[in-house]
Amino acid sequence: MQETSSQNVTIITCTAPVNIAVIKYWGKRHEELILPINSSLSVTLHQDQLKTTTTVACSRHFQEDRIWLNGKEEDINQPRIQSCLREIRRLARKRRSDEDPSNDISLAHRVHICSVNNFPTAAGLASSAAGYACLGKFENLPVTIYVFYLLLACSTVCLSVYSLSCLFGVDGELSVVARQGSGSACRSMYGGFVQWKMGERQDGKDSLAEQVEPESHWPELRVLVLVVSAERKPVGSTSGMQTSVKTSKLLKHRADCVVPGRMEEMISAIQRRDFAAFGELTMKDSNQFHATCLDTYPPIFYLNDISQKVISLVHRYNQHYQDTRVAYTFDAGPNAVIYTLENHVPEFIQAVRYFFPPETNGGEFVKGLPVGPASLSEDLKTAIGLEPVPRGISYVISTKVGPGPCVVEDPNLHLLNPEGLPKKST
């Protein structure tokens, strides 16, 4: 935290991760409080490859609350942002009266929030999770361009909540606050493997995130994000959920009869580090989520032809080895997230290169963690047997399981200058 003497601006910067659900959240029982109709479980991705950085500044000289996302000022009066700000200030007020009445940061002071991502917005990742997660230690909005939209939005929300909580000295269950900005954001409040318990209370106080295992639990696990498309989603997640809740009988069956048992099985598979069980559950849940979208009326189509070919690639690859070596999951969009173990990454990446040949003169195809060379046997090529689709995959992000939000100590990394305005580089 840094305070400048000229403007009395208190500044704090935090980073937060994105998360990818392996048991999906789809549908709310309470729209305003963002209470889900089923529990969910996700994997937090490493911030070295995918993260949101948020700086929050507070000063009595600020005339109003303001927010900048990826270099552009946005409307801070968006209801979900306001909900997070109100809740953080309420918790800070309660803590101040109970424990620390001398704290010199007035809750009446306005805040400036600035948030950026270290991955392309067009990748469609849920940054609101990371951003709203920071609000707690800050606060942020969902990003507006698709590809990793869900991931990006979650990251931004998470980070905003986390950052604001640090600024105002708020402790306690911050995932409840992050949830009010973006449902999936509450899962980005922790690293490793995280469950979001749906809860039963009407006020939502028991709808919160809990860490199942830390990021160090399964060091061999790897995550590959196959970026298929940067187009906008034809149906947004919020409206899609609302329509599914109203029209899909499969959704109700899934929430009532399938997810409770599947959550127990998934937690057990993670704790045992049983990749075959983990991978099968992950793929089945992804398939059922998209079946629910098709059962919605009118139906919702998030996958495209390339998505379907990736699914075929994974199943034929596994069938060749008579073993579940890789697993796919798709959120509300066409981009595939692949889970596998470290020793299988080089060969599977080579399979992706072979069946989705990238542009020869294009940019770097695999970004993130380095991937060693590998060759494909003719038997494997024949077993997969797909017609290659040039440029079907734009690029791949190689990453692993990572930690939750953290405070950035270096003041040079603040996104806001001493006056509380975005630096030119942001």
Image: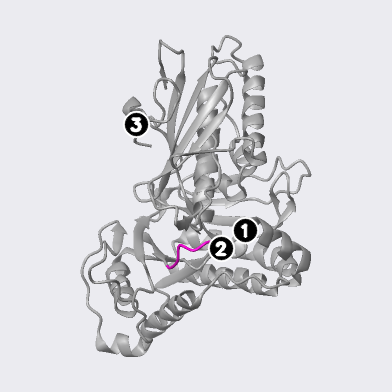
Quadrant assignment, res 253: bottom right
The Cα–Cα distance between marks 3 and 1, rounded to whole angstroms, is 33 Å
N-terminal of the pair, mark 3 or mark 1, is 1
**109 magenta-colored:** no
Q: Quadrant of the C terminus?
A: top left
Q: Are marks 3 and 2 in contact (CB under 8 Å)?
A: no
Q: Is residue 28 left or right of residue 145?
A: right
Main secondary structure found in the magenta portion: loop
Q: Position of residue 334 (x, y in %)?
A: 50, 68
**What secondary structure is found at the residue carrying circle 3?**
helix
Residue tagged 1? 237
Magenta region, residue range:
228-232
The Cα–Cα distance between marks 3 and 2, rounded to whole angstroms, is 33 Å
Q: Nearer the viewer, residue 83 or 361?
A: 361
Residue tagged 2? 233
Q: Nearer the viewer, residue 375 or 390?
A: 390
